Image (cartoon, rainbow, N blue to C red):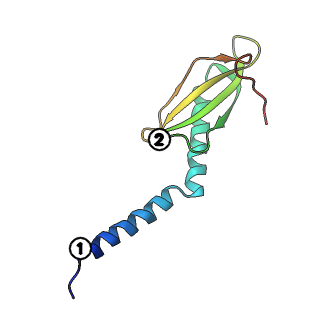
Amino acid sequence: MRIRPTSILSLFAAASLVAAAHASSGDAWEELRADVSARCIAAAESLEGASAVVDPFGTESYGLALVSGKPKDGDGSVTQICVYDKQTKAVELGGEIGAQLVPVSKP
């Protein structure tokens, strides 16, 4: 039996589709969102009672979240943009944005 190059290509294509489907499964997205939330809240050391609203999918390379809470040295509520690198799992926070610019309500 002779194996055709198109048969091999078809096999690789099918394997790629299975891997992609697994990577984008509901459980995988939920795990990503949970990790983004936990790491972003942990990084928000300047906030009391921090909570995160996570973008459901982020970008191809980054998870994104808005982290809100009360500044430890101030009043009111502030929000910080959190960027999570999907490969290294490192997070970075932007500066504090006041509630007058980003109104925050807890769900």
Tag 2 or tag 1, which sits nearer the N-term?
1
Name above or below for residue 98 compared with residue 49.
above
Q: Amino acid at mark 1?
A: Pro
Q: Nearer the viewer, mark 1 or mark 2?
A: 1
Q: Which quarter of the figure is the C terminus placed in?
A: top right
Q: CA distance from mark 1 to mark 2?
A: 35 Å
Query: Residue at 56% across / 46% down in the picture?
Result: 32
Mark seen at residue 86: 2
Q: Is residue 106 left or right of residue 11?
A: right
- Image coordinates for residue 10, horizontal then vertical, percent: 34, 71
> Relative to residue 93, is residue 74 depicted above or below?
above
Residue at 70%, 22% in the rendered image: 102
Instruction: Indicate left or right for 9 with 31 as reference.
Output: left
For mark 2, does the 10 Å Cα neighbourhood hold few (<14), some (14 to 19), or many (20 or more) residues? Answer: some
Q: What is the three-letter code of the residue carrying label 2?
A: Lys
Crowding at mark 1 (Cα within 10 Å: few <14, some 14-19, many 20+): few
Query: Is there a contact, CB below 8 Å, between mark 1 and mark 2?
Result: no
Disc 1: which residue: 5
- The image shows a total of numbered marks equal to 2
Say which residue appears at 21% left-offset and 88% top-offset: 1
Residue 28 locus on image (x, y percent): 55, 54
Q: Residue at x 77, y 15 (%)?
A: 76
Find residue 24 and report its horizontal and vertical position in percent. 52, 55
Residue in the foreground of this view, choosing between 100 and 26: 100
Asked which quadrant contains residue 35, the reply is top right
Q: Position of residue 18 (x, y in %)?
A: 45, 65
- Dividing the picture into quadrants, the one containing residue 56 is top right
Q: In the rendering, which numbered label is found on residue 100?
A: none
